[in-house]
Image (cartoon, rainbow, N blue to C red):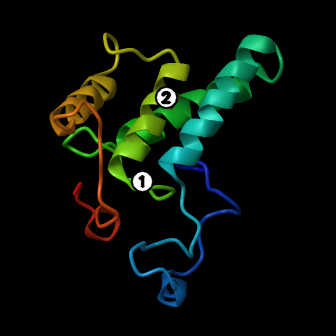
Amino acid sequence: SKSGGITGWEPAGAPSWIELLNPIEFLDEVIIEHDYVECTASALKAMTLFQKLHPKHRKNEVNNFIINAVKFIEDLQKPDGSWYGRWGVCFIYSTWWAISGLVAAEKTYSNCLPIRKATDFLLNIQCGDGGWGESYLSCPNKVKL
């Protein structure tokens, strides 16, 4: 898309009133297609691998896709270092996808501020037992719970 992001099923752009038909109480904005961090990161991983296997095939288009996808992901990062997820619950899941996409595009802790911020976010919310957890209520409240 023009934003550099990828949707799940069809082009984004349906009228917003269609969201009133959403039957899922704890998830919003799931009826209308949007560009998603998770889908964009997944496609970014695929395109970077494709580029390594076939470096000359549609080189400019692939490079432009990678540049735009990285920018899309970086631009959606929240101030706390997380990303809001729509395909899972919610901030931890989407942050994992965002990091994996950025890493596929050769971004590292050393050369990418969003990865450093994401690392801080994940370390700050880590549970005492070493794992991570998040309530489904993070989705409707748009705050990590």
How many numbered marks does the figure carry? 2
**Helix, strand or loop at mark 1:** loop
| 126 displayed left or right of 12 | left
Q: Nearer the viewer, residue 2 or 143?
A: 143
- Residue 5: horizontal and vertical position, in percent? 55, 47
User: How packed is label 2: few (under 14 Cα within 10 Å), some, or many (20 or more)?
Assistant: some
**Left or right: where 83 falls relative to 66:** left
Question: Dividing the picture into quarters, in which one does residue 107 lie?
Answer: top left
| Most distant residue in the front direction | 129
User: Which amino acid lies under the numbered mark 2 shown in the image of this protein?
Assistant: Ser
Q: Can see residue 22?
A: yes
Q: Taking 62 as reference, is 72 above or below it?
A: below
- The amino acid pointed to by label 1 is Gly
Q: Secondary structure at mark 2?
A: helix
Could you tell me if residue 5 is visible in this image? Answer: no
Q: Above or below — where is 44 with respect to 110?
A: below
Q: Position of residue 18 (x, y in %)?
A: 55, 86
The reply, left or right, for residue 41 in relation to residue 134 is right
The label number, if any, that marks residue 100 in the structure image: 2
Measuring 54% from the left and 37% from the top, which residue is drawn there? 41
Who's the residue at 39% across and 75% down the image?
Answer: 26
Instruction: Give the x, y percent position of residue 136.
Output: 34, 64
In the rendered view, would you say 72 is above or below 17?
A: above
Q: CA distance from mark 1 to mark 2?
A: 14 Å
Where does the image place residue 60, in percent across and percent down from the top left?
71, 23
Q: Which residue is mark 1?
A: 85
